[in-house]
Amino acid sequence: MKKITNKLLIFISVFFSIILLSGCSSQMAKYNPKESVGKQINYTITGIEAGAGEMATTQKAMKAYGLDKGNWQLQTSSTAAMLSTLGKSIRYKQPIVITGWTPHWMFTKYKLKFLKDPKNIYGKTEDINTIVRKGLKKDKPEAYELLNRFHWRPEQMSSVMLRVNHGESPRKAAGDWIKQNQAQVNSWTKGIKHVHGQKLKLTYVAWDSEIASTNVVANALRSIGYKVTIQAMELQPMWTSIATKAADGTVSAWLPNTQGLYYNDFKGRFDDLGENLHGAKVGLAVPTYMKNVNSISDLK
C-alpha cells in the first residue's frame, strides 16, 4: 500500500507540475527581442527535480551573476514537466530558459543553445564514468572487463534516447542500437569468455541519458551470458548501492561537478573505471530563435 501511495504521489506531483508550467507557457506571447527576457518569462528559469545537482549549481550561478538580487527564481518541477513546457514554448516560439544538459534527445529534437558561462560556474565539459563495487574484478572478472571497455559517443547515446522518446522500450531501443553498431560492441566483448547465467545488478539514476547507457551495457553483458537486472534510484542511493556492494556497478556517474559530492563522500569504497563518455555538458539553455540571449549575463 505504501509503495502504491508513493507512486501515486509522484504521479500527482508530475501531473500538477506539467499543468502549472503548461499553463504559464500557453499564456506567453512570442519571443520579442526588443523586450527584457526576464519580463517576458516572469523572471523564471524552468528547472527540474529539486535534488538534481544541476539545480544546486544553477542557484550558485544565479547568485554569481546577480540574478538573485532581482526578481529571478528557479522553478522546481520535474524533468517531464520541463520537457513538456519546453516543447510547447518552442511550438509557439515563446521565450524560455531551462536547466539543460547533453547528451539528451532534446538537443537532437529541438534547436537549442547553451548560454555562455564566463564565470565558469557550471564548469567545463564533463565525463560520465563507470563505477563498480570493490571486489568485482576478482568475483566477476568478465563483467569487470566489459564494463572497463564500455565507451561510446554523445551522439550515439542521443540516438538511443530519441528512440525511447519516440515510443520504443529502452531495452528494445538498446538492442536495435547494438545491432546497428555490432562492430563497436564486439570490441567490448572480444576475448571475454561466456559465463552461464551469473547474476549481475546495475543501478542508475533515471535520467533519459542513463536509461539509454544502462540498457545498452546491460544488453552487452547479457550477450556474454550474464543475467542482468537494472534498478533506477535517486543519486545518493545509487552511490550507496555501489559502496555497500548491494549492486555491482553503474555507468551513470557524471563527473567532476554534477555528482562530485557523492564521489568524494564515498571515495575509497568503490573502483572508478574511468570515463565511458566524454563531452557531457550542463548549463542554462534557450531555443536558438532567442538570438539576443547568448550568455547568462544577458539575463540580467
Image (cartoon, grey):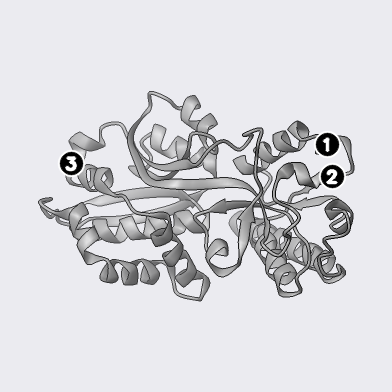
Location of residue 290 with respect to 272 vertically, above or below = below
Write the residue at 37% across / 60% down: 215
Residue closer to the observer: 25 or 271: 25
Q: Report the residue marked by disc 1.
A: 68
Q: Report the residue marked by disc 2.
A: 72
Of the numbered discs 3 and 2, the one sitting upstream in the chain is 2
Location of residue 132 with respect to 173 vertically, above or below = above
From the top left corner, tell me how far across and down residue 295 is, in percent.
Answer: 70, 46
Q: What is the distance, in whole Å, between disc 3 and disc 2 at their CAs?
A: 51 Å
Element under label 3?
A: helix
Q: Amino acid at mark 2?
A: Trp
Q: Amino acid at mark 3?
A: Pro
* Residue 51 visible in this rendered orientation of the protein: no
**Quarter of the C terminus within the rendering:** top right
Label pair 2/1, CB-CB below 8 angstroms: yes
Q: Report the residue marked by disc 3.
A: 141
Write the residue at 38% across / 40% down: 246
**Quarter of the N terminus within the rendering:** bottom right
Element under label 2?
A: loop
* Residue 260 visible in this rendered orientation of the protein: yes
Q: Which of the labelled discs sits on residue 150, or is there none?
A: none
Write the residue at 12% across / 55% down: 194
**Could you classify mark 3 by the number of other residues whose Cα lies within 10 Å: few (under 14), some (14-19), or many (20 or more)?**
some
Is residue 95 shown left or right of residue 234? Answer: right
From the top left corner, tell me how far across and down residue 182 is, in percent.
Answer: 22, 66
Q: What is the distance, in whole Å, between disc 2 and disc 1 at their CAs?
A: 6 Å
Q: Amino acid at mark 1?
A: Asp
Residue closer to the observer: 229 or 281: 281
Is residue 57 shown left or right of residue 234? Answer: right
